[in-house]
Amino acid sequence: MRHYFSSKEVIMRKTRLMVLLVLVVFALLLGGCATIDKLKTPDKMTHMELAAWANGVYNAQYDDYVARTADPSLLTEEQKKILRAKKKLLTEAHAILMLYSGYVEKGIIPSRELEQMLISIVDRLMWEVLTW
């Protein structure tokens, strides 16, 4: 047995669904806005937070590199060139990250120059990779 709804009932159901959808989106936006003030820029992070953040960015980029180079036969020459540049940048970043993290783990306050080097290389990892 089929139930047929009048056009008025269909409109009411759609209206309720839209109101519910708007309320859910509004609640998600409010939740997102509440967490934005908790985000820190690198210059506001503690040494431990900076090391953890940089390590997270490095690991994400490294995982991306490994995934993309899993089957080199599928890559074009241009893609290979880009991935070689990414590997060079990852190698440079790894050395700086290990030095900075080593200091932090031992309780030694890294120099401001090393901190700036770390922020700069992580910035390059995030933004140069996006433009490739």
Image: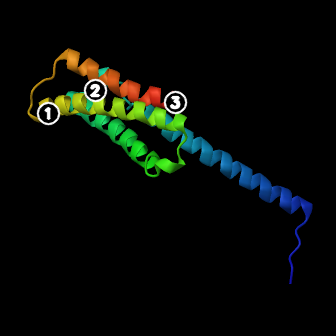
Q: Crowding near pointer 2: few (<14 within 10 Å), some, many (20+)? A: few
Which quadrant of the view contains residue 53? top left
Between circles 3 and 1, the one closer to the viewer is: 3
Q: How many marks?
A: 3
Density class for disc 3 (Cα within 10 Å; few <14, some 14-19, many ≥20) is: few
- The residue lying furthest to the right in this view is 7
| Residue kind at label 3, given as amino acid type | Trp
The CA distance from mark 3 to mark 1 is 31 Å
Helix, strand or loop status at disc 1: helix
| Kind of residue indicated by mark 2 | Met
Residue 132's x, y, as percent? 52, 30
Q: Earlier in the sequence, mark 3 or mark 2?
A: 2
Residue at which label 2 appears: 45
Q: Nearer the viewer, mark 1 or mark 2?
A: 1
Three-letter amino acid code at the position of disc 1: Gly
Whole-percent x and y of residue 119?
31, 23
Residue drawn at (40%, 25%) of the image: 124
Q: Nearer the viewer, residue 100 or 53?
A: 100
Observer-nearest residue: 44 or 50?
50
Residue 104 location (% of width, % of height): 15, 31
Q: Report x, y in % for residue 125.
A: 39, 29
The residues tagged by marks 1 and 2 sit, at their Cα atoms, a distance apart of 17 Å
- Disc 2 is placed on an element classified as loop
Check disc 3 and report the residue beneath it: 132
Spatial CA distance of label 3 from label 2 is 28 Å
Badge 1 is on which residue? Answer: 102
